[in-house]
Image (tube, rainbow, N blue to C red):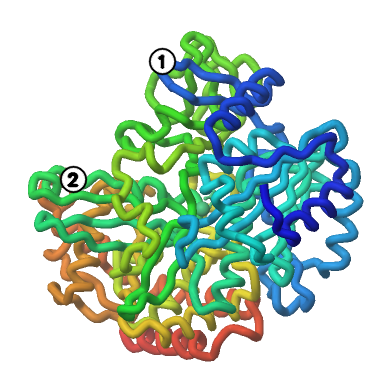
């Protein structure tokens, strides 16, 4: 399929190590994909679901010990430890290559090695980056066909160049003691072994499009971020774009596919999804920041996805979807998960492959769930009813606002605006989420997750913040930066803000600020809306007073957070830019003055 000597030489080397029985090149054709699906069905790797109800949909179960990303087994292997930083796990490249070579040697004996040429971004576009993943898993091939742009045209676009990301994945024996997800940013290489779970093995996603790409972005003056991209279309047809970063499991996919409340819908507002997880951002010739979603599909969390929370996502999964670790409804050969509806199937198999008795289901005990809490759907972007018409635009979309979000019971107000790009980068650096009563362990434990990138920066976190600050100097007309918190609770622990589609009310304020169309109050943390400027029309149980409460800035709880931030900065280490410390000191001084 190619004469590229870098590609061929590398594949020879990997094949000599892993020793597959045969090598199959993935060409991106439907015929080949169909033959692979049939083969995977015949071995039980996937199960075909009801063709009438869920056309071209399949079910897969991972090993019980292999259901999520493994941060403690994820390594950044730079030649100098300091370059990986304190927040990442580090291994010396030579040591890591040697260790993993032992695990890979002969690992594909009796198996087929699939060669997947793929592009993150539209093939041939200035944003696009190419990768080749070698894997012994048909499940990985089928997922990559949905999540990325795969095929011979990638090899054509690559030509004779050696500029591609070399990804090697072997299932080996799925032994968690020997599971490693290793990144060699200096070598454009990713090695993953002993896992079959998406985030660890679909190497285009977190491994390439965030960890390796963040490293490349720093070298090449662009940014790879853990952000959704959405467009708000106004009744006059103009569309404004927002990128938003939230820690995993804070509702990014729901926000990206938001359905406007009736009040806005009636006036002709629409919301379009460009991406739900990753944004690559570049400075455009017009001096604005432009975003593309480098992915081609959604790898979304199934539980909780339903007609109310995210009808667009649900619709997207009705065809051409791979479901992983959900409940198999044997009566009609479909799937189910907790939070889909109130009718759990009586005749069903759970995510572990055992007969599932829904009457024993107890919300508080995760072990009784039929679907794994991190069960997933892999669905094609083109099947999403609210997909933006700019999704395939090689130039991307211009970004008006960047939004950071966390899960805070008390500290952060519903929304506030930073006072500058530098202050906004600081707001991103102190992002955090608190554990809730629903999760095991202490309530209110704060996990700092800067820019929602804690597990995804491919180099030192302090350097990453410095890169953010530098980018601010390279964007003549930068987006405004905001912070939102949908998760504020009352004294009984109930969420005050309705969330979901009503989050649009907050986005509208954000966009009005970007246009300079609304005033705001300056507070010690930044600009906070006048309560009257958050539209509550058509909202039940939310009054102006509720909004006032949601917007209040609790100086004491902010001051209490300062020590935690300082401790986190100390953990990040000596590459934290001085500007971040200056911002922190200034925040503390403003809070003290407001006491
Ligand atoms: C994801 C994650 O799967 O952030 O997107 O964990
Ligand atoms: Mn994510």
Front label number (1 vs 2): 1
Apparent side of residue 382 relative to residue 179 in the rendered image (left or right)? left
Decide: is 528 above or below 120.
below
Quadrant hosting residue 593: bottom left
Considering the numbered disc 2 on the image, is that residue within a helix, a strand or a loop?
loop
Q: Is residue 183 above or below residue 561?
A: above
Badge 2 crowding class, 10 Å Cα cut-off, few under 14, some 14 to 19, many 20 or more, is some
- Viewport quadrant of the C terminus: bottom left
Element type where label 1 sits in the image:
loop
Residue drawn at (32%, 35%) of the image: 311
Is ligand 2 within 8 Å of the beta carbon of the residue shown at mark 2? Answer: no
Residue 20 percent coordinates (x, y):
84, 39
User: Quadrant of the rendered structure where residue 592 is?
Assistant: bottom left
507 up-or-down from 107: above or below: below
- Would residue 129 appear left or right of 168 to someone viewing this image? left
Image-based side of 147 in relation to 234, left or right? right
Residue 247, position as x, y percentages in the image: 49, 57
Question: What is the x, y in percent for residue 543?
Answer: 14, 53
Report x, y in % for residue 536.
Answer: 14, 53
State the residue position of label 1. Answer: 52
Relative depth, front residue between 311 and 317: 317
Point out which mark residue 146 bears. none
Q: Nearer the viewer, residue 420 or 493?
A: 420
**How many numbered dots are placed on residues in this image?**
2
Q: Is residue 418 visible in this depiction of the protein?
A: no
Alpha carbons under labels 1 and 2: distance apart: 32 Å
- Residue ID for mark 2: 261
Q: Earlier in the sequence, mark 1 or mark 2?
A: 1
Out of 207 and 31, give the one closest to the viewer: 31
Residue beneath the point at 32% across and 31% down: 307
């Amino acid at each position: 399929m190619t004469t590229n000597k870098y590609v061929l030489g590398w594949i020879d080397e990997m094949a000599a190590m892993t020793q597959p029985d045969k090598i199959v090149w993935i060409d991106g054709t439907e015929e080949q994909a169909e033959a692979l699906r049939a083969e995977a069905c015949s071995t039980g790797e996937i199960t075909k679901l009801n063709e009438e109800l869920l056309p071209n949909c399949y079910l897969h179960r991972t090993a019980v010990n292999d259901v999520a990303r493994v941060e403690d087994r994820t390594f950044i292997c730079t030649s100098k430890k300091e370059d990986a930083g304190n927040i990442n796990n580090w291994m010396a490249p030579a040591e890591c290559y040697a260790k993993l070579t032992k695990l890979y040697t002969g690992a594909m004996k009796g198996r087929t090695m699939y060669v997947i040429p793929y592009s993150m971004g539209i093939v041939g576009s200035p944003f696009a980056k190419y990768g080749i993943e070698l894997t012994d898993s048909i499940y990985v091939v089928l997922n990559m066909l949905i999540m990325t742009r795969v095929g011979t045209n990638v090899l054509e676009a690559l030509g004779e160049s050696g500029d591609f990301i070399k990804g090697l994945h072997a299932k080996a024996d799925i032994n968690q003691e020997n599971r490693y997800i290793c990144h060699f940013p200096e070598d454009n290489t990713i090695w993953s072994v002993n896992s079959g779970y998406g985030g660890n093995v679909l190497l285009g996603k977190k491994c390439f499009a965030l960890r390796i790409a963040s490293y490349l972005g720093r070298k090449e003056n662009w940014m790879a971020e853990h952000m959704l991209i959405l467009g708000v279309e106004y009744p006059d047809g103009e569309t404004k774009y927002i990128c938003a970063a939230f820690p995993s499991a804070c509702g990014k996919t729901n926000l990206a596919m938001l359905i406007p409340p009736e009040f806005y819908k009636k006036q002709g507002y629409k919301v379009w999804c460009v991406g739900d997880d990753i944004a690559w951002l570049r400075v455009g010739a017009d001096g604005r920041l432009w975003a593309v979603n480098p992915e081609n599909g959604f790898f979304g969390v199934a539980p909780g996805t339903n007609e109310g929370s995210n009808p667009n996502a649900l619709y997207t999964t009705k065809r051409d979807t791979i479901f992983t670790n959900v409940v198999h409804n044997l009566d009609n050969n479909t799937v189910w998960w907790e939070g889909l509806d109130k009718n759990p199937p009586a005749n069903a198999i759970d995510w572990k492959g055992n007969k599932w008795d829904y009457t024993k289901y107890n919300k508080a005990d995760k072990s009784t769930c039929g679907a794994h809490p991190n069960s997933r759907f892999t669905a094609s972007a083109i099947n999403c009813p609210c997909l933006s018409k700019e999704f395939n635009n090689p130039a991307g979309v211009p970004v008006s606002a960047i939004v950071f979000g966390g899960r805070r019971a008390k500290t952060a107000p519903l929304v506030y605006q930073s006072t500058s790009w530098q202050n906004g980068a600081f707001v991103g650096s102190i992002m955090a989420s608190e554990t809730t009563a629903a999760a095991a362990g202490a309530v209110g434990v704060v996990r700092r997750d800067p820019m929602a990138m804690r597990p995804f920066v491919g180099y030192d976190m302090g350097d990453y913040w410095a890169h953010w600050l530098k980018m601010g100097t390279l964007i003549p007309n930068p987006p405004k930066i905001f912070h939102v918190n949908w998760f504020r609770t009352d004294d009984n622990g109930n969420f005050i803000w309705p969330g979901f589609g009503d989050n649009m009310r907050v986005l509208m304020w954000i966009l009005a600020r970007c246009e300079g169309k609304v005033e705001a109050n300056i507070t010690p943390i930044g600009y906070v809306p006048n309560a009257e400027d958050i539209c509550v029309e058509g909202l039940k149980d939310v009054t102006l007073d509720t909004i006032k409460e949601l917007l209040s800035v609790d100086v004491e709880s902010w001051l209490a957070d300062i020590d935690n931030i300082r401790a986190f900065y100390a953990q990040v280490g000596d590459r934290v830019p001085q500007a971040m410390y200056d911002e922190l000191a200034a925040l503390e001084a403003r809070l003290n003055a407001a006491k």
